[in-house]
Amino acid sequence: MGRFVFIGFILFLFILLDWYTFHGMAGLFTNGRHQRLFRVAYLGLSISTYVFLVAVMYLFYTGQMVHRTEMANFMNGFVFAVFVSKLLFCSILVLQDGVRALLGGYQYMQSYILDSPEKEVFMPERRKFVTTAGTFVAALPFFTMLYGITRGKYQYTVEKVVIESPDLPEAFDGFTVVQISDIHAGSFDNKEKVMAGVQKINALNPDLVCFTGDLVNAEKEEILPYIDVFGAIKAKYGKYAVLGNHDYYGSYDRNNPEATKAYYEEYFQSYKKMGFELMNNTHTTLTLEGQNIHLVGVENWGAGNWFPKKGDLDLATAGIPSGDFSILMSHDPTHWEQKVLSNNHPVQLTLSGHTHGFQFGFQMPGFKWSPAQYRYKQWSGLYNQDNKYLYVNRGFGFLGFPGRVGMWPEITLIELKKGKRTDATL
């Protein structure tokens, strides 16, 4: 029953936005021919949207969205783009109509007080330039989101970062680490385009590859079509991974320890087949020319009550000599400020993901913006406090909205350098 109520609410909301948008935009077309063209175009857009909406709901509720197709993702993204654009347009229209209602009410009260013989509510007509401006404002996210769902989601971008630390051994000066995060294999719809991202990774010839969690959206089967793709990633000194919050969302009986164990034993086999060593609250030591650094991995730990808190940093760092250089893989960046900075064992570099940069925003030299910054203090890029660094990767895949706008999928190339101690804080 609840499912049908939800579907009914969504359809009602779409119809309400449709009706309001249609009547709002219709006022822009006074010429008879233009009116007919507008009605035909609007009707075609609306019919397409409703067909896509019903199809997407059907695919979700029948479980056919575990392995996506390009058409399924396009329909999902198109419906979302139309919804956001109409919601934005209607918001502007509501503001304008609110002002019109206030002016009309004022005129009526004025005529009533002055005992005018014609006590009629005077409603000013909508300002055409406001409606026109609202149309352009609404069109901008619509077309940018169309780009995001057709091209942006596979527009892999390499971000190069240099990390300097006085604790880094000389032998590791110039050592390179590629970080990827948030693969979300269940959202992919084109193996060739995903492989293009993997080829970009291999072109960097990294010493080490670190994957910081969320291999799937929910179900372990989502990664199966892409095992050969991510298995093709190459690194001189190994590929390592940790779990993210979505890696715990699979369908299994959580009250049955045997069922849980069987589920994860099968799931973890996928990491082995791809050549990744999964690090659940443990560490490994890398040695060059007799000198060591340590790679630490923890299970997911997220602030608040939304996400699992399975990460155990004390257990993962046990046995690491004090003062040795360590790299921590921890999926959720909130772990850094709440646990890592205050931990007794210093971790010089933490690699996280999780935020996706909300898959929408702007980036330019010296400036970046995304709705993610209102949810996460550390949401994208490099942060430094007391010579302890955090890098937050925007993610390799996508989730929910099947696209990316401005916050393109990221491959991070980190070069480690022997440096002097500073007190800079970002």
Image (spheres, rainbow, N blue to C red):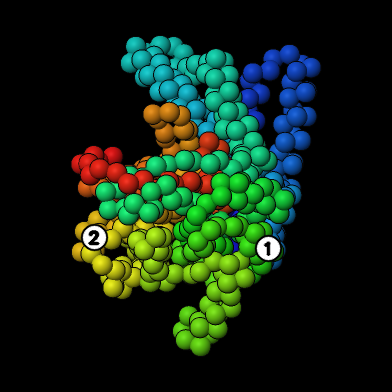
Q: Quadrant of residue 351?
A: bottom left
Q: Residue at x 42, y 47 (%)?
A: 174
Q: Is residue 310 left or right of residue 360?
A: left
User: Which quadrant holds the C terminus?
Assistant: top left
Q: Is residue 358 left or right of residue 308?
A: right
* Mark 1: few/some/many CA within 10 Å (<14, 14-19, 20+): some
On screen, residue 315 above or below 393: below
- Residue 380 x/y as whole percent: 41, 44
Q: Residue at x 51, y 83 (%)?
A: 261
Give the mark nearest the N terminus, 1 or 2: 1
Q: Residue at x 49, y 57 (%)?
A: 208
Does residue 211 show up? no
- Residue 355 x/y as whole percent: 44, 50
Cα–Cα span, label 1 and label 2: 39 Å
On screen, residue 45 above or below 358: above
> What kind of residue is marked 2?
Gly
* Mark 2: few/some/many CA within 10 Å (<14, 14-19, 20+): few
> What kind of residue is marked 1?
Asp
Q: Quadrant of residue 287?
A: bottom left
Discs 1/2, front: 2
Q: Nearer the viewer, residue 116 or 29?
A: 29
- Which residue lies under the disc numbered 2? 323
- Residue 395 x/y as whole percent: 51, 50
- Which residue lies under the disc numbered 1? 228
